[in-house]
């Protein structure tokens, strides 16, 4: 199963003919898995969500900048060989320990049985495209062994609840690309990045490329925490 936002550890590579003559190169749309040996962002990072609420009258609770509910990844329509849309269900882990429960599936009615992980959203900086400034975010999934990252961007503005992101490509620098040499057809390549500054530089570069697609909230939910959801390491089926 292909992985635009954490579905499986595979690379999606497709090509779209560029506008121009026959001698011009085709444009390659690329999404390579990004992985760090340890999570790069934690609760010491100011824009790291969900996180504990702060206030004199608050006993416990988690707040988020990214809306919980059912979201859909839609590939860029300019890609002539796109991956199918992917559904995500995001929910709160708990009131004392904050994290996002993430389930994914190719169809919305399959989300209850989809692969499970936990993660966080982090705003890691800003970038420029076509004279405009964009916030750069990441979805950081998993904790052991390390984390996987999806590069995201949004127009920015008010600090309101976020309901949509641009999903960026991940055209991995050759110096960060790892892969086994001989495993037949089995995909092993991924992008290893263990430095926040390097990840931000990479994301800024990807912001200048055509978007890989969009991630948009289809239906929000207001529900209690799903503390019964197992960690992936406790559920071998995931």
Image: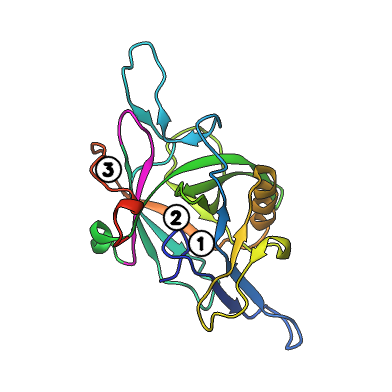
- Between 120 and 193, the one lying in front of the other is 193
- Between 179 and 206, the one lying in front of the other is 179
Mark 3 vs mark 1, CA separation in Å:
23 Å
Which element type, helix, strand or loop, lies under badge 2?
strand
Q: Please report the bounds of the magenta region as a residue range.
A: 94-106
Tell me if residue 111 comes above or below residue 38 in the rendering.
below
Say which mark, if any, is on residue 215: 2
Q: Is residue 81 left or right of residue 196?
A: left
Q: Residues within 10 Å of mark 2 (few under 14, many from 20)?
A: many
Tell me if residue 47 comes above or below residue 198 in the rendering.
above
Q: Residue 2 at x, y = what percent?
A: 44, 70
Which element type, helix, strand or loop, lies under badge 3?
loop
Q: How many marks?
A: 3
Mark 2 vs mark 1, CA separation in Å:
7 Å
Mark 2 and mark 1 residues within 8 Å of each other at the beta carbon? yes
Residue drawn at x 42%, y 41% as measured from the top left: 66
Q: Residue 196 at x, y = what percent?
A: 64, 43
Q: Residue 32 at x, y = what percent?
A: 57, 65
Mark 2 vs mark 3, CA separation in Å:
16 Å
Identify the residue position indicated by label 3 in the image.
221
Say which mark, if any, is on residue 72: none
Q: Mark 2 or 3 closer to N-term?
A: 2
Identify the residue position indicated by label 1 in the image.
213
């Amino acid at each position: 199963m292909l992985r635009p936002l954490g579905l499986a550890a595979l690379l999606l590579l497709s090509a779209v003919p560029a506008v121009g003559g026959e001698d011009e190169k085709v444009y390659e749309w690329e999404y390579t898995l990004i992985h760090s040996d340890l999570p790069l962002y934690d609760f010491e990072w100011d824009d790291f969500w969900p996180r504990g609420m702060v206030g004199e009258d608050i006993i416990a609770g988690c707040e988020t900048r990214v809306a919980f509910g059912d979201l859909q990844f839609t590939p860029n329509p300019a890609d002539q060989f796109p991956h199918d849309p992917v559904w995500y269900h995001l929910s709160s882990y708990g009131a004392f320990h904050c994290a996002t429960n993430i389930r994914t599936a190719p169809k919305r009615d399959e989300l209850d049985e989809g692969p499970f992980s936990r993660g966080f959203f982090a705003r890691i900086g800003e970038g420029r495209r076509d004279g405009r400034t964009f916030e750069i975010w990441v979805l950081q999934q998993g904790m052991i062994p390390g984390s996987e990252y999806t590069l995201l961007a949004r127009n920015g503005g008010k600090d309101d609840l976020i309901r949509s992101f641009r999903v960026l490509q991940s055209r991995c620098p050759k110096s960060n690309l790892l892969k086994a040499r001989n495993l037949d057809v089995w995909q092993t390549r991924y992008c290893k990045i263990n430095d926040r500054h390097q990840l931000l530089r990479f994301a800024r570069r990807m912001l200048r490329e055509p978007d890989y697609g969009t991630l948009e909230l289809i239906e929000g939910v207001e529900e209690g925490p799903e503390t019964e959801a197992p960690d992936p390491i406790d559920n071998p089926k995931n």
